[in-house]
Image (cartoon, rainbow, N blue to C red):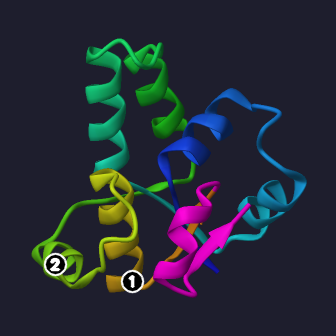
């Protein structure tokens, strides 16, 4: 299975946080590939600049460089898919992650139940 990590999952993996369930850890361990979107790095940068997130960006960069994740850039096909999504969720970062997952296709690993109605590709953990 090819997984796209949502931002919360990425941060929880990086911190080995207790919020990361056993089911999520199993999926991560068994995945064929792990992907992290540019969207997540953008979200982290914005939230950090707004004071909503305390995270050393160098630590995030080091974690990504040392991990097996593959970067996922934002493509025009993702933006076109985003236009077709119903307004079920207000967070633009999460909506773009859904659009990317549907376009590639990848399974989006998330802890946000509001994303589940978008697609069978969304895995709630």
Q: Quadrant of the C terminus?
A: bottom right
Report which quarter residue 22 is drawn in: bottom right
- Can you give x and y, in whole percent of width and height, for residue 80 in the image? 13, 81
Vertical position of residue 55 compared to residue 95: above or below: above
Seen at 34% across and 19% down, the residue is: 48
Looking at this view, is 72 or 19 the one in front?
19
Under circle 2, the secondary element is: helix
Q: Magenta residues?
A: 111-125
- Can you give x and y, in whole percent of width and height, for residue 117 in the image? 53, 80
Report which quarter residue 83 is drawn in: bottom left
Seen at 50% across and 54% down, the residue is: 6
- Can you give x and y, in whole percent of width and height, for residue 91 in the image? 34, 52
Under circle 1, the secondary element is: helix
Seen at 77% across and 58% down, the residue is: 24
Looking at this view, is 8 or 32 the one in front?
8
Vertical position of residue 114 compared to residue 49: above or below: below
Give the side of residue 52 with respect to residue 9, left or right.
Answer: left
Tell how many labels: 2
Give the side of residue 96 with respect to residue 3, left or right.
Answer: left
Give the side of residue 67 with respect to residue 72, left or right.
Answer: right
Vertical position of residue 27 compared to residue 47: above or below: below
How far apart marks 2 and 1 lie (CA) works out to 12 Å
The residue beneath circle 1 is 102
Neighbours of disc 1 within 10 Å: few (<14), some (14-19), many (20+)? many
The residue beneath circle 2 is 83
């Amino acid at each position: 299975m090819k997984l796209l990590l949502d931002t919360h999952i990425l941060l929880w993996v990086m911190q080995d946080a207790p919020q990361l369930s056993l089911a999520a850890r199993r999926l991560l361990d068994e995945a064929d590939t792990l992907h992290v979107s540019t969207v997540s790095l953008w979200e982290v940068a914005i939230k950090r600049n707004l004071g909503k997130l305390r995270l050393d960006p160098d630590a995030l960069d080091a974690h990504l460089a040392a991990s097996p994740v593959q970067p996922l850039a934002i493509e025009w096909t993702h933006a076109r898919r985003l236009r077709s999504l119903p307004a079920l969720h207000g967070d633009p970062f999460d909506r773009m992650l859904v659009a990317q997952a549907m376009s590639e296709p990848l399974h989006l690993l998330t802890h946000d139940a509001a994303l589940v109605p978008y697609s069978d590709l969304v895995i709630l953990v």
